[in-house]
Every structure is written in C-alpha cells, then in structure tokens.
Image (cartoon, helix red, strand yellow):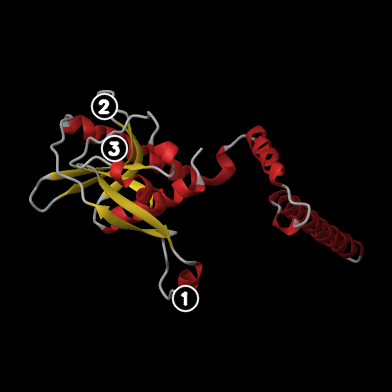
C-alpha cells in the first residue's frame, strides 16, 4: 500500500516528466531480472536518440536503507525524496545518481493561485545525475515499457467504466470496508450514510414514477370505459 506522501511524489513526478516532453509510467518491471523501476520515462530526442530516465521514490530513511533492488538502468537515474529526507541522507547518495527533492505547496499559495494546479507540490533538482549507457536490450526495454503503459490504460478504462463491471458480492464487500471509517460525529461525510440516503431517495422516486404511470393508465382506461358507455 502506497503512503499519501508516496502518491504525492508520484503524481508530481509524472506531471514534471510530461512537462519535459517525456512519456512516463510507474512500476515498470525490467527484463533480465533487473527489478522494478518506480517510475520510468522515455523521450525520443531531436538528435534521433532515445533517452531513458529512472526514478526511485523514497519517503523515509528506512525506506532509503532497505535492501530492495534499485533499478538504475537508465541513461539518467534519480532518487526522488522529500526535502527533509534528502538533507538527512545526502552524503549517502552515489555520485552518479541525481536527486529531485519534493516540497508541498503552501495552502495559502494554492488558494491565491489564479491558474489550475495539477500537483500537490513541486520538485527541485538538488543534484544532477551522470550519463550512462543503457546496457539492457533496447527492444526488450521498450516492450516492458509498453506493457506497463497498457496496464495503466486498462486501469483508466476500468475507472471510466465505473462499477458496472463488478459483481454485486464484490460491491457489497467494498461497502463493508468503508464502514470501518464511519464517523458518528460527522454523518454527512460518511459514504455509507450518503449511499443509503441516495438509494432510499432513488427508490422513493422510482416508486412515485411507477405510481404516476399507473394512475395515468387507470385514467386512460376510465376514459375509454366512459366513452364506450356513451356511444
């Protein structure tokens, strides 16, 4: 499960890559048992060359010191860290690895902004990476990149489709999960209550529409009977 801070870094990094003209995707499994890149970006340069950048996201010191494999296989490789974490461990970062530090926008700045803000914060280049050649097979790397892009497209299409694809039993289980966050002091913010209220309202509306339709049918039949008697 990703933390809120990890998701903030991920979203900010994605938008930063897009602004730079790159195509970015999260959690790309590398060929040749090279691990999983947190975020991998690709850009075809005007020179005709392909450029790959790898980003590893870390939000705590224990996360940074974990034994998880670091998939720094790109032409340029970075750690993406909260500014406070970078200041704490900057002497431990290898010389060839770059660093992007993350800072969250101030709420007052966001409120005063006249332009739409797409990210919760911003990234600053604290340390530039050194260029290195990609040693993996470029065709195989591109295939894995495309597989991950296809996965994200499938996820987006599921969101667009909504809940219609899920069986009733699955939806019931998901509703029960929401119950653990029930707030008895603020019922208006409870999804559970909102769902029940809306369901009840929709049911009443549907029943009223059915009653209205039946009344129209009865009125129509009564009129037909009256006309038949007075012919």
- The answer to whether residue 120 is visible is yes
Q: Which mark is residue 112?
A: 1
- Provide residue 128's location: percent of width, then percent of height: 21, 51
- Provide residue 69's location: percent of width, then percent of height: 33, 29
- Provide residue 125's location: percent of width, then percent of height: 27, 56
Task: Look at the image and tell me in which quarter the C terminus lies.
Answer: bottom right
Report which quarter residue 34 is drawn in.
Answer: top left
Q: Residue reaching furthest left?
A: 47
Q: CA distance from mark 2 to mark 3?
A: 13 Å
Please indicate whether residue 112 sits to the left or right of residue 38 in the image: right
Q: CA distance from mark 3 to mark 1?
A: 39 Å
* Residue at point 76%, 56% (across, down): 187
SS at mark 2 in the image: loop
Please indicate whether residue 215 sits to the left or right of residue 74 in the image: right
- The answer to whether residue 119 is visible is no
The answer to whether 77 is drawn above or below residue 108 in the figure is above
Q: Which mark is residue 31?
A: 2
SS at mark 1 in the image: helix
Residue that carries the numbered disc 3 in the rendered image: 146
């Amino acid at each position: 499960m990703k933390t809120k801070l990890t998701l903030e870094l991920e979203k900010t990094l994605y938008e930063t890559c897009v602004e730079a003209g790159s195509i970015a995707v999260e959690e790309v499994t590398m060929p040749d048992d090279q691990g999983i890149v947190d975020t991998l970006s690709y850009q075809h340069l005007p020179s005709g060359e392909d450029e790959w950048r790898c980003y590893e996201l870390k939000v705590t010191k224990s996360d940074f010191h974990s034994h998880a494999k670091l998939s720094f296989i790109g032409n340029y490789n970075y750690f993406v860290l909260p500014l406070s974490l970078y200041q704490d461990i900057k002497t431990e970062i290898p010389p060839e690895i770059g660093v992007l530090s993350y800072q969250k926008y101030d709420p007052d700045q966001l409120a005063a902004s006249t332009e739409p803000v797409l990210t919760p914060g911003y990234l600053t280049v604290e340390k530039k990476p050194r260029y290195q050649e990609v040693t993996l097979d470029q065709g195989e790397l591109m295939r894995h990149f495309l597989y991950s892009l296809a996965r994200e497209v499938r996820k987006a299409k599921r969101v667009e489709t909504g809940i219609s694809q899920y069986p009733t039993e699955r939806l019931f289980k998901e509703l029960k999960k929401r119950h653990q966050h029930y707030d008895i002091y603020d019922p208006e913010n409870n999804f559970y209550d909102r769902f029940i209220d809306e369901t009840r309202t929709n049911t009443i509306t549907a029943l009223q529409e059915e009653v209205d339709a039946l009344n129209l049918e009865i009125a129509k039949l009564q009129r037909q009977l009256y006309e038949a008697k007075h012919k």
